[in-house]
Image (cartoon, helix red, strand yellow):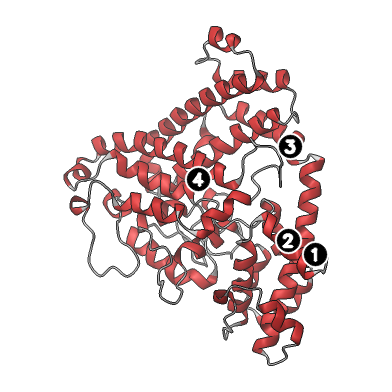
Amino acid sequence: MNWEQLLSLKRFGDTTKRERAQQDETRLGFEVDFDRIIFSSAFRSLQDKTQVIPLSKTDFVHTRLTHSLEVSVVGRTLGRKVGKVLLERHPKLQELGYTFNDFGAIVAAASVMHDIGNPPFGHSGEKAIGEYFKTGNGLQYKSDLTEKEYQDLTDFEGNANGFKIVTENKAGAEGGLRLSYATLGAFMKYPKESLPKKPTKHIVDKKYGFFQSEKGAFLDVAEDLGLLQKESNGISFYRHPLAYLVEAADDICYTIIDFEDGINLGLIEEDYALEYMIKLVKNTIDSKKYHSLQYKKDRVSYLRALAIGVLINEAVDIFLANEEAILKGEFDKSLLDKCKYEAQMNDIINISVDKIYKSKEVIEKEVAGYKIIADLLDVFVTALNNKFNAKQSNYDKLVLNLLPREYQQEKESLYSRIMQICNYVAGLSDGYAIRLHKKLTGNII
């Protein structure tokens, strides 16, 4: 892969190449990507979607929205630091007009939308959709779907749904948000289809990145960027290099900031937790300043800031040391899986799993989420299929009137009809999913 091609400013529908030197320096094409994402309705819904603690009533716990904004800040710094060195290594990019801010803008835009396709109720939302088709009432559709279509549903993937949201053609809005292909490439952490499932231990095969419905859009982006195709019996490519930085930004934030939430909520004892944080920042901490901080929240914030800085520098060093391998598709792990702080990070993650992710509050909300998502899918998929098959009841008519018009299309393909309902349910906020479920079950009017 080569950087000139990987930094493509092309957008869906372009018939001529967009030259970097001709960009408006007051609002670069990659910065336009960030703006379009921020103003999208799908991004706004993240303000009421779970990051760690579902439906928390406190004022400091992170939602998907605040998490995404923080990941974009870290991503921008990672991109700028890497870009500054890459421009020195590849002077042709400077001649073409690229600056280190371009790298920062691409990674920031891809980072801010990295969770845009995630369903309500955290990662359990993805599992709930999958279970509906694997063991629930959705199993009845298996025989009428292709193997890959059915796999898309049973392993419903937020990354693939995110790609659908930002690229899907709709009436009068072809190409979705029409983001630059460089940003779309950096967004695609798993540039493969749902089957074969985990064919290798390479990081790109961990999950999948597009549904069968967006296969054409994916291939168009991959070809334009010059992504390397893997040897596989399905559609599978190696990552856009900047996807490693997007992944690192997310890894840094959820590891450190979820831990911070756990401490502030009292789920993790402060003295016990801060001991682990100090191990991570022992070479950069100012002990005098730290001990002068009187309040827990200030001490945690100080260590969090130091930890993020340490991990940013570590991720940048690893990326730059392995640039050639990354461009060849030979770097098979995440950046932070190769870092010298891996043991400390694993300790923090293990505590978070035990004390936060498995806490009673989280599990209770996830259990409720399973029921809510299964019921919503059942009602809407049934109603849409009954309408298509001319078996529509009065209840089906009423139910479909609750759907926005763009989700009421009677598409010929069963897969397309099911997928548009999955896309609708996945786009709901936690709070609205609960309210809608109560209305459908007659609990509130």
Residue 399 versus residue 108 in the image, above or below? below
Q: CA distance from mark 2 to mark 3?
A: 26 Å
Q: Looking at the rendering, which quadrant does residue 216 occupy?
A: bottom left
- Mark 3 or mark 1, which has the lower sequence index? 3
In space, the residues marked 1 and 2 are separated at their CA atoms by 8 Å
Which residue position is annotated with label 1? 444
Residue type beneath disc 2? Arg
Mark 2 or 3, nearer chain start? 3
Mark 1–mark 4 Cα distance, whole angstroms, equals 51 Å
In the image shown, does 234 or 41 lie closer to the viewer?
41
Identify the residue under disc 2. Answer: 435
Return the disc, 1 or 4, that comes first in the chain's sequence.
Answer: 4
Residue farthest toward the bottom in the current orientation of the protein: 390
**From mark 4 to mark 3, how far is it between C-alphas?**
29 Å
The residue labelled by disc 3 is: 356
Q: Can residue 238 be seen at all in this image of the molecule? A: no
* Residue behind mark 4: 332
Going by the numbered disc 4, the residue's amino acid type is: Asp
Which of the two residues, 336 or 439, is positioned nearer the viewer here?
A: 439
Q: Give the structural element (helix, strand or loop) at label 2.
A: helix
* Residue 40 percent across, percent down from the top left: 47, 58
Name the N-terminal-most of marks 2 and 4: 4
Q: Nearer the viewer, mark 1 or mark 4?
A: 1
- Mark 1 surroundings within 10 Å by alpha-carbon count, few (fewer than 14), some (14 through 19), many (20 or more): few
| Label 3 to label 1: alpha-carbon separation | 32 Å
Q: Indicate whether 325 appears above or below 32.
A: above
Q: Earlier in the sequence, mark 4 or mark 3?
A: 4
